[in-house]
Amino acid sequence: MGNENPQLHVLFFPLMAHGHMIPMVDMAKLFAARGVKATIVTTPLNAPFISKTIERIKTRGGGGGAKVDIQMIKFPVEKAGLPEGCENFELLPSRGMLSSFLKALAVLQEPFEQLLHDIDYHADCLVADMFYPWATDAAAKFGIPRLVFNGTSFFSPTAVESMMQYEPHKKVLSDSEPFLIPNFPGEIKLTSMQVPSFIREEVETDMTNVLKKAAEAGMRSYGIVVNSFYELEPAYADHYRNVLGKKAWHIGPVSVCNKEAQDKAQRGKQSSVDEHECLKWLNAKKPNSVVYVCFGSLAYFNDSQLMEIAMGLEASGQQFIWVVRKEKNGGGKEEWLPQGFEKRMEGKGLIIRGWAPQVLILDHEAVGGFVTHCGWNSTLEGVTAGVPMITWPVFAEQFFNEKLVTQVLKIGVEVGVERWVDGDDEVGEENIKKEAVEKAMKRIMVGEEAEEMRSRAKALGEMARRAVEEDGSSYSDLNSLIGELKSRCP
Ligand code: UDP
């Protein structure tokens, strides 16, 4: 290393799930733009999701010798008892196979260490997803620091710590009785039904086991990189660092590194809609007149829930782009759409079946609202776009993200989801009715309350972009992280 290879080399190892891969690829690009050599480790079936991005960096070049490479390791489907080709969380045939997927993630340690051993250009640091608790020890074997990426904010891990320690959900009389999160900045209310099962569950599951190991490995790791910006959640960033005593760098919103339309359109999967067509549709609309509706890469809504959404959107009278994770199979009738819906909505509502170029859409000036499942990436992308949101959390830490949006930032309204969705349940067992959708749509788009939310959202969006500009809070934190890593190199 040293004189022969003076450039800092950081390895990025994302979890094979779009909500984790997308931000980590952006992160690799950010490091590369500061002259760091970045290598993303992934598996053969996941590589195509990022290779276009990497190609674009290669052909465009970039300041500071931007260079991002891919290194491949085999995903141990057989050893874990997974079907052939099941290399991404979204490809699991059922949530019942989650344990096998977690097993595969554990088995990855061996090929990953082999890669660290074989790699031509010695790595100086490993940024690995929290779902690889073993990565802290693997990095230590090669004498390099391991940084954790957990794909979320400061707010939710801080809330989780507090919930685990004080167990307020066990001190209420019913599942629906609201309680405050104890020893936590702000008066944040939620109910037991909204608490993730990994906090609620008394018995150990494969998931709680991995999360326990992840927490333990996190304590021993060099620190954590957070896709957030200080001005968004100062009280929680301070609490995380000063009260919980964790070493963290905030470097987001990482999605802002995608400046050109193609960069924005090519995040994650191949878009199901022609990006030019999509932009043409949006270009014909007035500023802040369209609501974008999307529930991320994992949540599945059942037909009757989709039907309620369709009716609610129509009744609201608002224009919309609605992303539905169901491909059209042949010309058959789609049970989730009211009769004649698309004909009636022509020019007013656009349905994207499959994958949408989300950031490209959100950043368009015509978009003035976002119905989101509150995955952290989507939440932050909505904040960055400066749009009020309708929150529709489903699982994971999404109810915490909802509370940040509605109770702290006050830039959104809840659609009224009462219960965290477990395991194989589809969204819609407890239907949100069309009236609730219609009401929430109007609340974020029309009237004084909407205007107030919009002006707060716009201000936050500007702060988000400033944070990643030169001398912004995230820009500076990334600089200090890179400086610290460089100073450790011989
Ligand atoms: N996304 C997208 N198009 C889609 C659905 C999702 O580009 O049709 C992107 C979205 O911009 C975000 C990520 O996929 O960056 C989803 O991550 P999030 O944390 O919001 O939710 P998850 O999919 O993990 O539930």
Image (cartoon, rainbow, N blue to C red):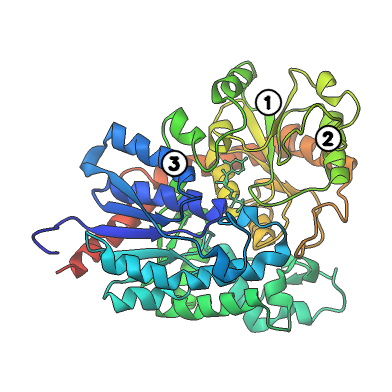
Relative to 388, 359 lies left or right: left
> Label 3: which residue?
256
What x and y, as percent, mark residue 48? 47, 43
Specify few, some or many for label 2: CA neighbours under 10 Å numbering under 14, 14-19, or 20 or more.
Answer: many
Relative to 399, 5 lies left or right: left
Q: CA distance from mark 3 to mark 1?
A: 23 Å
* 321 lies above or below 439: above
Q: CA distance from mark 2 to mark 3?
A: 31 Å
Label 3 vs 1, first from the N-terminus: 3
- For this orientation, the residue located farthest to the left is 3
Specify few, some or many for label 3: CA neighbours under 10 Å numbering under 14, 14-19, or 20 or more.
Answer: some
Local secondary structure at mark 1: loop
Label 2 vs 3, first from the N-terminus: 3
Quadrant of the rendered structure where residue 442 is? top right
Badge 3 amino acid: Val
* 280 lies above or below 476: above
